[in-house]
Every structure is written in structure tokens, then in C-alpha cells.
Image (tube, grey):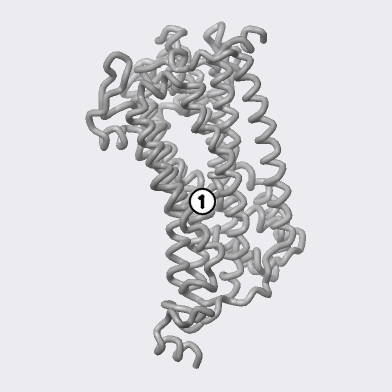
Amino acid sequence: MQDFLSNTVALSRLQFAVTAIFHMLWPVLTTGMGIYLVIIEGLWLKTRNLDYYHHARFWARLYVLNFGIGVATGLPMAFQFGLNWAPFSESVGDFFGTVLGFEGTMAFMLEASFLGIMLFGWDRVPPLIHYLATILVAIGANLSTFWILSANSWLQTPAGGIFVDGKFVVQDYFAAIANPFMVNSFLHMFFATLETSMFVIGGISAWCILTGRQPQFFARSLQVILVVVMAVAPLQIFIGHLSAEQVSVHQPAKLAAMEALWETVPAKTPAAWSVVALPNDKAEKNDWELSIPGALSYILELKPQLDKPIQGLKDWAPVDRPRMVGLIYYSFRIMVAIGLFFAALMAVTVLQWLRGKLKPEIISQQKWLLRAWVFAAPLGYLAVETGWIVRCVGRQPWIVYGEMRTAESASNLPPGEILFSLTGLSVMYIVFLIATLYFGSRIIRNGPDLTLPAPRGSEASLWGTVTKHETNRRPAEIAEVKE
């Protein structure tokens, strides 16, 4: 313990991990919920059903709460690159800093600029302008995901330039942005945030139905998100599989850690898949293991025998392979198990829907199903966090894979200063978490305001609404709406 508390690199890594884990809790919901708001407002514009309008107003309150906390928790991450990881920033800043700058100027500013219109513009702008603002907010949130995943994917598979005297020189920005991991990584995270958000909305809706809080209102939100989940849950499993295949090609040491595989499996032989095991890093073996013979061959190549060998961890020197194999191994399995559980819950719910069991007047009778949705609500967060643990811990000992080691990238700071900032950040994040749970629960318990009238004039035309600023509108349109 004393060695850890005096290890600058370990403390800086722990501080960044704490920051990232806490910050991740909020953008995950805003990025996916932004798409839900686009869908629900689109249904309002198409059908003019006031229920959809009330849904848009209610869920937007949770959106803005998550947005505000997400901004506050994300700021310390940016400062750490200059404070705790100055050698890294100096080495790769020409590309990495540029991409993070794109995230701030293109994505965050786009989302923040139109958020006010989305929240307060219902009676102040025409319906389609308001809908455009909602779309741009969702685009901004997900564009942020794109740039962050592009930057992180570059750390996994650096491309588009060369290292000269320890400094990355960009030769092709597009090749660096579109590095080998980028597409699948972005899609995997995009569907992860969307799936997590849908199950959070579904879990909240299920809890409200179970407790008798406006069951008809929340039965509708459950049905809307179920349609989305029907497409997202299978796609997420497929994209996850493609990502694992990429890991096997570009980061075989990470794959070996994900499977707690110590010995190389030769080509033309079946590879067993480990279901549960107890990895022992010091002994370089699993103390015990339960595996399915030949299953890993089918998972990776859809064949009973491998065409290519799978390298074991012993193929790399201890300093060149991931540590904490048990953490990587079980994080990967937790993520996969949650993805499969989501798909199964989706399938069972669709079956009950087809049987007519999800009608608003009788949905409260499906207590076991509703409880399963409530149970599923926080699992998406766990899947995202464990996925990032696999992604980043499995990359070690490299901060830029194969090019720059993590130990070379940390600033030489006094351990006491890092401990002080780590403690302060931890306390601050706990306060943020408590505040979010408190205000979020108040929003949920108070429920939607079903007496809220539709925006003035919205029933007359998609292209405009009459407000107190009628002098800014065309006379013919004003007269048409007033009639």
C-alpha cells in the first residue's frame, strides 16, 4: 500500500479512472436520450397527440439535469491532460489535442447552443424550428461521442503519422481520425448509449406503472422505447462481436487477457471458451476454470478449428502485457452478459406485447416483467463502464499502443498533490451523484404535467405558430391561424 501511495503513475492513473468513471454516468444518458427526444417530438408533430408533447417536456427535464452534471464532471478530465499527463500531451498534442478541440467546438457548442431553444422555445419559435433545435442537440451530443471515440481509438490503433524523437508528427489527419478501430468503436459506443438510455427510460416507466403513477402515460413511453430496443439490442451484440474480432487482429495481448488465456492455442485446433476462471497473474495460470470445449473457435471464426493461432499471455514479456487480468476478464464477461440479458428481456417483452399484455389498461398486471425492466435500468451503465475498463486497462502498458508507454507519459508530480486532488475530486463527484439522484427522483416522483397546454398555434400548421411576437409573422399566416 505504501508503494502505491508513493507511485506517481499509479496515482495519476487512478485519478483519471475515477474522473472518467464518474463523468461517464451522465453523457451516456444524454446522448441516447437526445435521440429519444427527437423520436418523441417527431411523433408529436406527426400525430398532434398531446400525450407525445407531454412526453417531450417531461423527459427533457431529465435530459437537462444530466447535461449540466455531465459538463461539470467533464471539466477536470481536460485539465488532467496538462497537469498529470504533460509528457503525453506534449508528444501527441498535435493530433490528440486537435481532436479534443473538435469535440469542444463542433459537438459541445452545437449541443449547448440549441439546448435553450429546445427547453424554452416551445411558444417562441415555429414547431419545425423547435424540432430542428432538438435534432441539433441530439447531433451535438452524439458528435461528441464520435470525436472522443476517434481520439481514444487512435490510442488503440495509432495511424496517420509517425513518431519522430518521441513526438507524433501528423502526416494525414483523415487517416488518423479514421484509424482502424474508429468505426466499430464509435458504433459500439453509439448503440451502448442508446441502449442504456432506452432501458433507463423503460425502467423509470416500469417503476411508475408499478407504483400507480400515471400508468397510461408511462405505458406509452415503454412501448416507444421497445420499438427502438428491438433494433438496437441485436445490433449492439453484432457490433460487439466485430469489435472483438478487431481486438484479435490489432491487440492480441488484450484478447488473451479478456479470455485469461496464458498458453497459445495453435492453428488447426479447437479453442475452448472460458466461462468463469480465477486468473493468477503471478503464477501465470488460472487457479481453476470452467470452459466450453471448442466454443472460442466458433466465437472468433465460426469454425470448429482455428485457421490462425490465438496467442497466450506468456508470448509477451511481463512488462509488455496487460496486468490485472482478472479485472479485464470479468469486466468483459459482465458487459457481454448484460448485452445478452437486454436482448432476452426485449424478446420476452415483445412477445407479451404481441399477446396484448402491454395495453395501458392491463400492463400493470405484468408485475414480473415490469420488475425486470426496473432491474435492467442501471445495468447499461455497468456495461458501459466495464466495457471501458476492458478497452483501457487491456491496452496497458501502452498509452499509445505499441508506441508510447503509460509510465513514460505521466508528469513527475509529488504523490501528496495527486492524493489531495484525487480526494477533492472524489468528494465533489459523490456530491454530484447525490444531487443528481435527489433532483432526478424529484422529477420522476412529480411526474409529467398533463395539464400543460400545447404550444400556441401548433395545431394549425407545422410551419409556424402564433405567439405574442405576431408582428414577425406573415399576415396571411396569422389570419389563417386565428381563424
Residue 284 x %, y %: 52, 8
Given residues 451 and 383, the one toward you in this image is 451
Residue in the image at 72% along x and 42% along y: 434
Reading the image, the residue beneath label 1 is: 32
In the displayed structure, does residue 8 sit left or right of residue 88? right
In the displayed structure, does residue 32 sit left or right of residue 434? left
Residue 263 x %, y %: 44, 12
The amino acid type, in three-letter code, at marker 1 is: Gly
Is residue 212 visible in this depiction of the protein?
yes
In the displayed structure, does residue 171 sit left or right of residue 122? left
Residue in the image at 42% along x and 86% along y: 477
Given residues 145 and 394, the one toward you in this image is 145
Is residue 289 visible in this depiction of the protein?
no
In the displayed structure, does residue 380 sit left or right of residue 174? right
What is the quadrant of the N terminus in the image? top right
Asked if 59 appears above or below 392 in the picture, the reply is below
Badge 1 crowding class, 10 Å Cα cut-off, few under 14, some 14 to 19, many 20 or more, is many
Answer with the quarter of the image where residue 450 lies: bottom right
Given residues 296 and 403, the one toward you in this image is 403
Residue in the image at 64% along x and 47% along y: 377
Circle 1 — which element? helix
Q: Residue furthest right?
A: 211
